[in-house]
Image (spheres, rainbow, N blue to C red):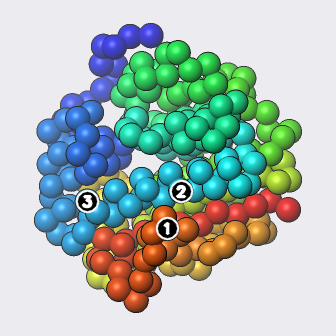
Amino acid sequence: MTDQPPAELDFDKPTIARAYDALLGGTDNFAADRALADHAVQHIPGLRESAVENRRVLVRGVRYLAAEAGMDQFLDLGSGLPTMENTHQVAQRENPDARVAYVDIDPLVAVQGRALLAENGRTTVTVGDVRDPAAVLADPAVAGLLDFSRPAAVMLVGMLHYLSPDVAGDVVAAYRDVLAPGSHLFITSLVDTGLPHQRDLARITRENLEEGWARTPAEIEHHFGDFALVEPGVTYTALWRPDTPVDPGNLAPGEQLGMAGIARKP
């Protein structure tokens, strides 16, 4: 393990993980990432608040999966840079034996993650391309930690909208198919309900990161396949089992940018 930047790190090109870190006010990002985040914030009302809310729904979703659904294995795909209340922290707070495998394409995620998890034997961080399920699932760090003959939770939190329409269906299906009955799939995504700022965010993301597609609620739900959605189904992230009451008729612009859902494999 090393705390030196990976040789392949491009300081001049923004990445998904680092731009998201910049939106959250983190420090694991470069000037290009901050420039993209600032540019997007100038054009998209409530974007920073939406990024924070996506992190909050991750916490609520993982807490549900570990405490109520009984999941003790998690595959967090496109996990991003470590920040407060990561998947392993939430899951292991509910069940100290929970195992979490993080996967992200950004090499900086592995550097930071492995440093954070140096003393946590039930958590791994892997550099991998979510769009190659066979390689991800066969990676020794993933295959050696998670037993997919048992129920597990696969997470595509803030990741689905970075999968292009021509590959997303096959990619998500590959992860669904490997899961045992009783497993869960957790998805959050940029949503398109016809609001201009939703489409603007997808466009800006695609122009600067070459990836970014907002999907209709029906399109998001389609990716759960024949899994049974848990209440309240696919809904705005702020409305997915909020810790405090939220008025559905009075959502802020940032609360209308993404939707979330969790479903169980029969």
Disc nearer the start of the sequence (1/2):
2
Apparent side of residue 8 relative to residue 118 in the rendered image (left or right): left
Residue 215 position, x and y percent, is 48, 73
Cα gap from disc 1 to disc 2, whole angstroms: 8 Å
Q: Quadrant of the C terminus?
A: bottom right
Query: What residue does disc 1 label?
Result: 242
Q: Which mark is residue 60?
A: 2
* Viewer-nearest of discs 1 and 3: 1
Apparent side of residue 249 relative to residue 201 in the rendered image (left or right): right
Q: Residue at x 59, y 66 (%)?
A: 261
| Mark 1 residue type | Pro
CB atoms of marks 1 and 2 within 8 Å: yes
Residue 14 position, x and y percent, is 25, 43
Disc nearer the start of the sequence (1/3):
3
| Mark 3 residue type | Arg
Q: Which mark is residue 48?
A: 3
Apparent side of residue 202 relative to residue 176 in the rendered image (left or right): left
At numbered mark 3, what does the secondary structure look like: helix, strand or loop?
helix
Name, please, the residue furthest toward the top. Answer: 1
Residue 68 position, x and y percent, is 71, 55
